Image (cartoon, rainbow, N blue to C red):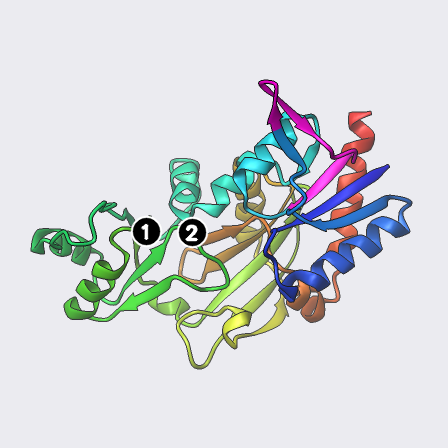
Amino acid sequence: MKGLILVNAYSSAFNARQVKRLTEELTARGVRVDARRNDFFPTKISDGKIATVCDSDFCIYLDKDKYVSQMLERSGVRLFNRAQAIELCDDKMQTHITLAGRGIPMPDTLPGLLCYDDRAELRPEIVDRVETLGYPVIVKLSFGSRGTGVFKANDRAELKDIMSRVKTLPHLFQKYIAPSAGKDMRVIVVGGKALGAILRSSDTDFRSNIGLGGNARAVDIPREIKERAERTAEILGLDYCGIDFLLADTPLVCEVNSNAFFDAFEAATDINVAAAYAEHIISVMDTKK
């Protein structure tokens, strides 16, 4: 069996360990692995058809380039995760829309109103309606990772400033969950099963991301969160993901990351995430045969 691990064409070294761990675990199980940047144009449209130079049986798609993922799938390559699942997670508003009405509690959310002209006036009544979420209010860019593009407005002046800066970009507004300020629980799900959880926390930021200085420690998963994490992954069609829960009386799904980094998770829990993912991939591919 041959597998391709594909990362972004302009990727820096921040995900090198993730690639290394996955390569190690797949190789140990007899899979030939080719890890590459997505810069060799593995697919193209030629003579009105999708053509590919990829000869791998499967691809671990550690990118968010939706065009290449769709084209690879159309050419018959099994992606982990599938193209649609990655797209649903990449767009945070789309994640919430997909989960809505499916028994998954989430923070109250308003979609950002996309503006096509950065000179357009921010009307007071728009700000008024966002204020119904209360202060502080969270403003998120719909596309972003590692805590970037997430802002907290403490009052109307800050909200207006942030809204003015993001109005031409896809974004959303969310109710601030005070009990979870600076902390959340990340659950890793592989093949429909929650492997474990870490509590991420920060003493200096309302965001708990490890890349922003947060820390992590292993915790037991409450049954409610475990079941909710597995159900979330099922709804979104994910083979692998990290799901972040805000910790209130009712745990709330905050975000779902289809390409969640697992370095901190493995270090904190001693759970071999890469091995679990490799075994899931091989199981799926064996079944496909």
Q: Is residue 134 above or below residue 167?
A: below
Going by the picture, which residue comes out furthest to the front?
Answer: 47
**Residue 237 in view (yes/no):** no
- Residue stretch in magenta: 45-61
3 within the magenta span: no
Relative placement, left or right, of 157 versus 29 is left
In percent of width and height, residue 242 lies at: 58, 54
Residue 82, horizontal then vertical, whole percent: 61, 36
Left or right position of 164 against 208: left
Q: Mark number for residue 143? A: 2
Mark 1 Cα-neighbour bin, 10 Å: few <14, some 14–19, many ≥20? many
**Residue at 78% across, 36% down:** 56
| Residue 144, above or below 53 | below
Q: Residue furthest left?
A: 124
**Whole-percent x, y for residue 153 in the image:** 25, 68
Instruction: Check disc 1 and report the residue beneath it.
Output: 171
95 vs 247, nearest the viewer: 95
